[in-house]
Image (tube, coloured by chain):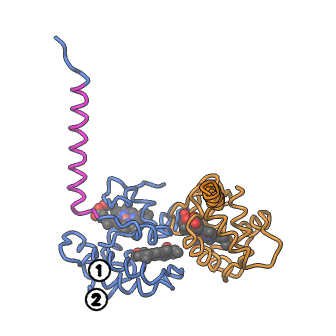
Chain colours: A orange, B blue
Amino acid sequence: MKNAIAITLAMLLSTASSAGPREDQLAQYAAATKSAGFSAARGQTLHTQNFAGGKPDTPACTSCHGKDVRGAGRTPVGKAIEAVAVSVTPTRYTDPAKVEKWFKRNCNEVLGRECTPQEKGDWLTYMIAQ
Amino acid sequence: MNIPYRPLALGFIALVFSVLVLERAQAGGSHFYAPVADPVVKEECGSCHLAFAPSMLPASSWQRMMGELKNHFGDDASLDADTTAKIARYLTANAADASGRRYSGKLLKGVALSSAPQRITELPKWVREHRKVPDWEWRHKDVRTKANCVACHADAEQGYYDEHSITARK
């Protein structure tokens, strides 16, 4: 009986540690789409593509985050932004409220609309792989 | 005769350092604007630009700005109601006209406190302080906007705007 409890506890703990906030976030986006999954390649396209629907001076995510996802970016007002690649800034995308806040602001800024869960999942997948 | 050079040198360095710091603090008397100390305000008002010193605008300005975050100079800077209220409290409590502020009044010379100006860079006193900055420098790729204080005031994050820390450009 004691053993069973210990094993259940160990299992609970190990699933808790393997599914971090980033994975939870991805799982939520996945639940909101009907597609077959996320693609880092599509995420990269979203990141680098120029859109016409948003503000003229920020046509792409790279306008602020820079062409090199492992390098620092810069806002139009000149404030430095830490690299968006998880390998360089490991604390990234661990606060779901922060992630959602910036997706909403930045997608409106660049695309002139909010991003879909599919787009968010693709973009996050790309950054986690970088 | 054994002269203790090392302690002497260290003492001298310490002396020079404290003189510099003192001078700094005195200069700070008129050029110091206490930087934002609250971590939430720093995070929410300091990621797109420098977290501007609350003592550069009167309380009425911050009140109006915090009520219009959805359209903040063309950007959406909106936050949930609790965070918005918390930040508004901090900014107004530390505003230029909050009680006990001695130096920050300077920037507000000639400004009606109730007029709620939204830009530091449009205050008459700010404009006068910057009248010698040439046009090309505002357009320089490392500056681009008047709101980019740090591009010229290297210690703006620490609250210092004196001439010693100005970045020269050619």
The structure residue drawn at horizontal position 77% and vertical position 63%, both measured from the top left corner, is A40
Three-letter residue code for mark 1: Pro
> Who is closer to the viewer here, B157 or B144?
B157
Mark 1, residues whose alpha carbon is within 10 Å: few (<14), some, or many (≥20)? many
Q: Is residue B146 magenta?
A: no
Q: Amino acid at mark 2?
A: Ser
Q: Is residue B113 above or below residue B54?
A: below
Parent chain of label 2:
B
Of the residues under marks 2 and 1, which one precedes in the sequence? Answer: 1
Quarter holding residue B89: bottom left
* Label 1 sits on residue: B58
Q: Are marks 2 and 1 on the same chain?
A: yes
Q: Main secondary structure of the magenta part?
A: helix
Residue with the mark numbered 2: B114
Residue nearest the observer in this picture, B70 or A74: B70
Residue B6, label in figure = none
Please indicate, yes or no, whether residue B134 appears anywhere in the rendered image: no
Q: Secondary structure at mark 1?
A: loop
Between residue A58 and residue B44, name the one nearer to us. B44
Image marks 2 and 1: residues in contact by CB distance under 8 Å: yes
Asked whether B17 falls inside the magenta stretch, the response is yes
Asked if residue A30 lies left or right of residue A55, the reply is right
Cα–Cα span, label 2 and label 1:
8 Å
Image quadrant occupied by the C terminus of chain A: bottom right
Q: List x then y, in percent, for residue A68.
A: 67, 56
The picture quadrant where one finds residue B16 is: top left
